[in-house]
Image (cartoon, rainbow, N blue to C red):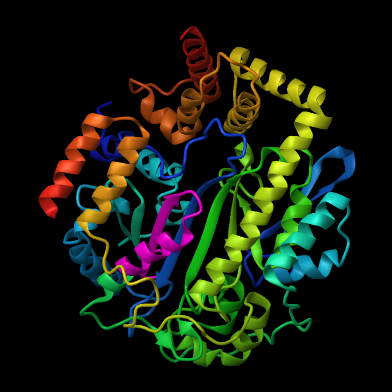
Amino acid sequence: MPRSRIQDQLSHVRPVWEPFLPDWRQVILAARVRLTRNLSGTPFPLKAGADELRHIASTFSRRLRNCSALRGGPHGAMDRLKPGERELLVERRLVEPGFAHGGSSREFAASRTHHLVVTVNDEDHLRVQATLPGLALQRAWGMASGMVTHLGEGGPGFAFDPRLGFLTSDPGDLGTGLRASVMVHLPALAWRGEMVQVRQALAKLGATVQGAFGAGGEAWGDLYEIANASTLGESEDGLIGRLEGLVLEVVRHERDARLSLVRRESVLFYDHVGRSYGILCFSRLLTVEEALGGISALVTGLRVGLLPKVNLDTLNRLLLEVQPGHLRSSVVGDQEPATWDAVRAQRVREALSAASRR
Amino acid sequence: MLCEKCHIRSATVHLSNEAQGGRQAVLNLCVHCATAALGEELVGSDVARLIAGLLARTGPAVAPPTAAPPAPAGQCPACGLTGTELEHLGKVGCAVCYQAFADHIGALLPTLHRGCEHHGGQPGTAAAPPDGAPTERDALLLELEQAVAEEAFERAAQIRDSLRRLE
């Protein structure tokens, strides 16, 4: 099956999050800021008619095409994309699953490196998302805010109330319309069974914790997103500063837990890494959850000097390659295999075997 | 996903419990219902240190009100959203809904946010650092960072040349 334009545009760009590094202290992988706005005088997408949605999509589409920062990046109408292409966008965290599989007149545009993504007619007329590696929340906010200002110029303005702030479809996004989140890798806290308590503690302090990959409350690969729960009642600076403080505390706690694993629970920890290595090297069936969990264990083990023959670059590539959409798009031929878990297991075995021969 | 207790707010806290047969049951709750359900039961000295550290950085948590907001009634005169739809979907249909359902949303806000009044940027003013619209230069700088990180120095040199031409 020939590769599509979107597949080509996505496959040659590395993910927006920072790759796993050999440094054992690395916890933060990416910072994201998403700004939500609706045009003044037009119903929000929930109640807008088909003509209104089309008009909004074509208005923003013109502005997006003329935006130099987005030139050369993937873009298009969601309902013209194939299901496989939408899956790739979701797995690279460029769009939300709900947006990818939603209704008509939905447009998206991303910059060449995918750090900036604009979606039109999601639950709100306009959402702008900026993602940068590391804890660069302020810079991400600057990028997203600049794009929002640019897209709003010369138009009817954004729906705004002096008391409630920017008006959004979800009252949970009201006010600043700013959702900041940080992607973190927490293998030690997860393995020690402390994530439930971490979630509870952060919930009491106005932050949410969700799995970056996984359904429902799961966090495959021990990858999480910590985000602000509140968007109203404080300034953008205050909101971002407070989230940064919470994340840095969690980072400190994760690093302490990693040291504790190596110093006080080394036998159990090394056994966990060894078993994960065995599963990845020899399984004939592998689910996404198992694959990502195994990658997380191997990364953690590599950082303390275990598994000298495993290559971090290989693990970073596998993080995306084992996901369903990426796996499907990499298979040559039109025939659907009997089970994708077998294809995934083979891909992982081959990758680890090739890496160990180098 | 809506909270499984109040069916109003989004579920952002996922609590795991050992169910019968040793399987894990997950309860999906909003921040307000989760806090009410859990009370002060947090165990483990490591977690106590984490909480102390979090509080030191952010100050005390804002306690949400205990009374549930009144059920939304009526209909928005602009978009036609009904109180039942608002209660079920948790979303509004237009800007006017915030006036039409002011009582319900007004009571909901303290459970969702740290305050009930906007303290952020205004439309038409620069709330963020005044970087202006992201430009081709910004995009090229990000590509340059990526190329250097990947040690693709030939591509990095091409991008550097493109930046010089822009300047």
Q: Residue at x 73, y 71 (%)?
A: B32
Classify residue B37 as left or right of residue A146: right
- Residue at position x 25%, y 35% in the image: A4
Establish if A73 lies above or below A301: below
Residue stretch in magenta: A122-147
User: Is residue A187 visible to the viewer in this orientation of the structure?
Assistant: yes
For the point 51% across and 53% down, which residue is it?
A135
Q: Nearer the viewer, residue A154 or B43?
A: B43
From the top left corner, tell me how far across and down residue B137 is, in percent: 22, 54
Is residue A8 rendered to the left or right of residue A26? left
> Does A106 sit left or right of B25 as displayed?
left
Pick out the residue farthest to the left: B165
Query: Does A247 appear in magenta?
Result: no
Q: Position of residue A161 (x, y in %)?
A: 44, 89
Q: Position of residue A301 (x, y in %)?
A: 65, 25
Q: Nearer the viewer, residue B131 or A32?
A: B131
Above-or-below relation of A248 to A237 = above
In the depicted structure, whether residue A181 falls above or below residue A270: below
Q: Quadrant of the N terminus of chain A?
A: top left
Nearer to the camera, A116 or A308: A308
- Residue A75 in view, yes or no: no
Q: Quadrant of residue A126?
A: bottom left
Residue that appears at 61% across and 32% down: A296
Q: What percent of the width, then of the height, locates residue A244? A: 58, 61
